[in-house]
Amino acid sequence: MPHTLPKLPYAYDALEPYIDAQTMEIHYTKHHQAYIDKLNAVLEKYPDLAKKSLEDLIGNLHDLPMNEEDRKTLKNNGGGHVNHSLFWQIMGPKKEVNQVLLEEIKKEFGSVEEFKKNFSDIAAKHFGSGWAWLVRDESGKLKIYSLPNQDSPLMHPPHLNGHTPVLGLDVWEHAYYLKYQNRRQEYIDAWWKVLKLL
């Protein structure tokens, strides 16, 4: 089955005033849909691969039997699809605090405030387009880092089964430019208001 746009779990204006309705609609219906369309187009060439889960494809990207141009298309657009699918789910108009995650963060980073400071700093300093991530590494340990473009933690590090994304913040300009223009830090500060898990 071709990949499809996952249902947005809230209305476009549900995250106002922090993320505006116009940005949400364009980001979801145009940018995310474009990743899916290009992902499906490349997978049409590889019927056997199309049967695999996206996580399996992304996590084993370097070993897939395809040419380098198609591998790059899959990386960019499969990554865009899997990254955005998580992004919509971790945000919401109401907090649904994950107490287990909260305690893990406190244990690993000292406090929630220290975690937010470190995560925000990585997101703000990321050069160009990309994402800031909270992940579980191959040993289950929580880590923060950023990745370029639509790279997914599932791809990193190569050949080590990747990392499991927990939280991801999209710092591509299309995620915030209509409301915040070049004020990425202001967007990051606002995002914590709609992150429902913490």
Image (tube, helix red, strand yellow):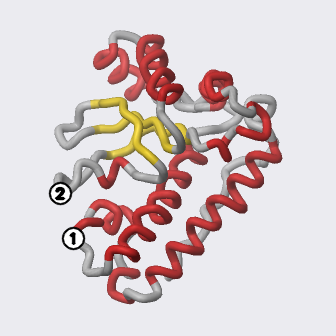
Q: How many marks?
A: 2
Which of the 4 image quadrants contains residue 176? top right
Q: CA distance from mark 2 to mark 1?
A: 8 Å
Q: In the structure shown, which secondary structural element does the residue marked by tag 1 occupy?
A: helix
Tell me the amino acid under the disc marked 2.
Answer: His
Q: Left or right: 131 with respect to 6?
A: left
* Mark 2 / mark 1, whichever is N-terminal: 1
- Pointer 1: what residue? 63
Q: Residues within 10 Å of mark 1 (few under 14, many from 20)?
A: few
| Residue shown at 31% from the left, 54% from the top | 155
Residue 165 pos. (x, y %): 38, 44
Question: Which x, y percent locates residue 10?
Answer: 72, 47
Instruction: Please tell me the numbered disc located at residue 120.
Output: none
The answer to which quarter of the image holds residue 192 is top right
Kind of residue at badge 1 = Asp
Residue 68 position (above or below residue 165):
below
The residue that appears at 67% across and 31% down in the rendered structure is 94
Horizontal and vertical percent position of residue 61: 29, 66
Q: Residue at x 54, y 54 (%)?
A: 85
In the visual, does 63 lie left or right of 55?
left
Q: Is residue 105 above or below residue 131?
A: above
Give neighbour class at mark 2: few <14, some 14-19, many 20+ (Cα, 10 Å): few
Residue contact at pointers 2 and 1, CB within 8 angstroms: yes
**Badge 2 is on which residue?**
159
Quarter where residue 46 is shown: bottom left
Tell me which residue sits at (78%, 40%) in the image. Answer: 178
Rendered view: 189 above or below 98? above
Q: Which secondary structure lies at badge 2?
A: loop
User: Measured from the top left, where is residue 128 in percent x and y?
Assistant: 53, 40
